[in-house]
Amino acid sequence: MNTLHLVFPILIAAAVFVLRWPHLRFPLDEDMATYTYIARFRHRGLKWKRDAFLFLYPIWRLQLIDRIYGKPEGGPMRVRLFIAAHNVITSIVTYGLVFTLSGNFWVGFIAGLLSAFFLTSPSLEAESFNTEPCYLPFLLTGFWLALLDPAYAVFAGLAWGLMIVGKLTTAVYVPAFLILMWLEQGAEPTFNAFMAAGLVVAASTAFDAARGFLDVESLGQIKSRMIATLRTAQRDPMLPRMLGDLKLIGAETLPVWLLGLPALAGAIVAPQGHWLAVLTGMTLFVLMAQRAFTRYHYTPLIAILTIATGLGLAQLIELGGWLGTLIISAWAVTLLFTVKRQLPYYLKPQDKETLATYGKFEQLIYLPYLGKLLKRLMRFQGKEEGRLYVWGNFTQLYHYSDCPAADSYVYYAMGPWLNSGLEPIFDSIIGGLIRHKPTYLVQAYPDFDPTLLKEITGLEYELIKTVLARYPIYSLKNSTTPKQDPLKLTWMEKCGLMERLTQGRHMPGISDTDLARGRELKALTECRKLVNLNPSDRDGRIFLGELCSRFGLHRQSASMFEWVVAHHPKLKHIRLMLAGQKIVLGELEEARFLIKDEIKLFGSSTETTQVLGRLEKASGEFRKAIDHFQNAIVDAPERWDLRLEQADCYERLTEPASARKRFLQVWEGATEKNEDGFRAQAAVGLARIGSIVNPESASLGDFCHKAPDNTALVYAHASALEREGQADQARNLFQLLTSQMQTDTLQASAWFRLARLSEGEERERCLKECIRRNPYHYAAQEMQTVWEESNVPV
């Protein structure tokens, strides 16, 4: 039997490396990228503290990782093998612990294999670099040695000291274990364990101090980073997040919960169970103290459940009989089902569908693409040796682009900023930007204002594109000296500037920056790339559906919304968006069903009432439509589009007085710049109603004099002139509008109308300009085809 003590650990170690193998060449996540940032750019002279904030003690651990990383080629793989070695120790110790407590080799072997499998679970973010796998083997080793014999107390203390080195917050375990050791084993083993643990921690601290990592600057960096991390941890409500994480983790580790929980309860009341009780209690305490803000914090808990599962199997084997056999068989079926469910993570680890199921799918799928693009841009500009700045915690972009950060903070932070401990972050970011003047700035998180940045630093950045409809990239356009040196401000003034600079949503997501500057086609193109990269991106499909609708691609838009409804049936408003497309497509019964389904699931709202009004209008039930729109107006009186819909219905009912009243309300009320479109529609309606007395073009001309900056109104005026045969005046206005219209689709429409009023090569040029801005303008395509057929060279 002694041979099994050699064979089983070897098999368990082999299992760990086999399970880790698919992740050795995995895309980087922000944790792995942060830990290896200095290692990646060490060849360019970058160092901790000077070029990257210190963020955990001991610092020599970070430098050890730098050594393991070595050269960039294969560096992440070597670090992952280092983590895998820790997993090996954890799984072998699990085998030893279960054998010690149960006396069963085979059960210990099964527990070791379960540890190898479930502690590399994707739900625990095992593809990342985090401290839990690094301290866990020492926590369990010390626990095991303390259980074995008081003579091993020194070694238990050494293991606990290494555990604290792995993560300082685990120091809370040691007093609990020492009290238990003192009560059970006496003062001498307790003292020996205490001294051994203290010696390791003291030696580690002294080594850092000797290398200059305990000075004021180092402590300030650690403090700033800790404050920023805690702010990020408090971004989401704790309980809903924990429930969501437990649901996902539970699904991927179900067998150890089913058998481990009852077995743990039984083991705690058994002899020596108080050790397990303390271990479990302190693990839960540490988990809650950290607010469990990331799923890898649950790793120690899963390790304990794995041990308990082994003990539960031993108890069932002892129970024997049909009941024990039945429970073990049922558990084995659950295990096989769970293993089968997780096979894609190991057989197709880098398949897009597999990567999309990870919590960090954005980092695994999108950022490699973005990083390669940034690298090409830097090479194109001849700035390979320059710096880059990324607002957000996506440190891996520096790795992918082969450009270090302009700042030394190299992380993300959010407010509130009124804390003197955050001053070093301002100095790092603003000072780094002024010093290095990075060619490109990536707004990975939307809560950053490049316009205010110009005021603070004198650096003027211009948006060049929004990659994948998520990541705005800005290029340095101009650099001037700021009115005052921002680094000489008081800490309160600095923090006040950061508060203003970082307003907005503190999470990455879809960005409408291209839409805000009228680049609808660019937004559509990038969003298509996004959905092609990751067909499971829900927000990407919603945004693509909205963009398709802008270009008149209603069938494609409906297809996007149908996918979202099918895969995310509990998402509000999507059925209404789909119903809107169905109405345009004339599929009214389907639209009615979708609206009813929305009301059934989420109740009535302004949106449901509005879509019902549009449905009744499309069905020719104008009175019903008017009533629905009126109900919606009561809830949302600022919605000018609802009044326009009402006015249109009154016109169709040949009630011009009522229609005119609504049009006037919109004309007089929609005075904001972003309401120009509504105001133009109201003016068109008023001119149409008054056309019996005055030509539409004349009325619209009067409105244009009242609102000369309203390009949508000028477009309507030009259209009226064209209809009335005043081609020259219309042509002049459309020519003017081709440069004044704010969006691609509106500019394309102006070019098309200009093409209709032109001849020969001028018509061809206008059509090409139209199609360049809107490739889906079918009337322009048809006209161009006719022109080409009629101008074929002989």
Image (cartoon, helix red, strand yellow):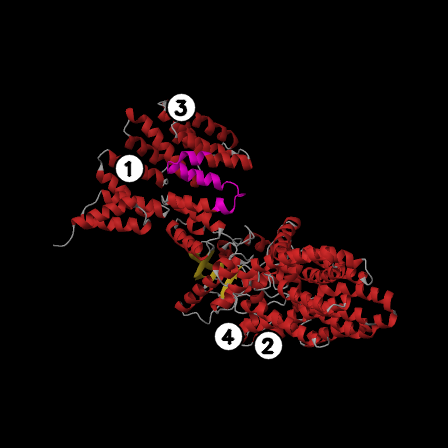
> Marks 3 and 1, Cα distance to the nearest angstrom?
25 Å
Which span is picked out in magenta? 564-592
What amino acid is found at the position of numbered circle 4 in the picture? Glu
What amino acid is found at the position of numbered circle 2 in the picture? Arg
User: Which residue in the structure is indicated by mark 2?
Assistant: 67
| Between discs 3 and 2, the one toward the N terminus | 2
Dominant SS type (magenta) = helix
Question: In x, y percent, where is residue 235?
Answer: 62, 52
> Marks 4 and 3, Cα distance to the nearest angstrom?
73 Å
Neighbourhood count class around disc 2 (C-alpha, 10 Å): few under 14, some 14–19, many 20 upward: some
Residue at 51% x, 61% y is 364
**Residue 73 disc label:** 4
> In front here: 379 or 793?
793
Q: Nearer the viewer, mark 4 or mark 2?
A: 4
Q: Secondary structure at mark 3?
A: helix
> Marks 1 and 4, Cα distance to the nearest angstrom?
62 Å
> In front here: 493 or 134?
134
Quarter of the rendering occupied by the N terminus? bottom right
What amino acid is found at the position of numbered circle 1 in the picture? Ser
> Marks 1 and 2, Cα distance to the nearest angstrom?
71 Å
Q: Secondary structure at mark 1?
A: helix
**Residue 658 disc label:** 3
* In this view, 587 is above or below 334: above
User: Which residue in the structure is indicated by mark 1?
Assistant: 719
Query: Given contact means CB atoms under 8 Å apart, are the residues at marks 4 and 3 in contact?
Result: no
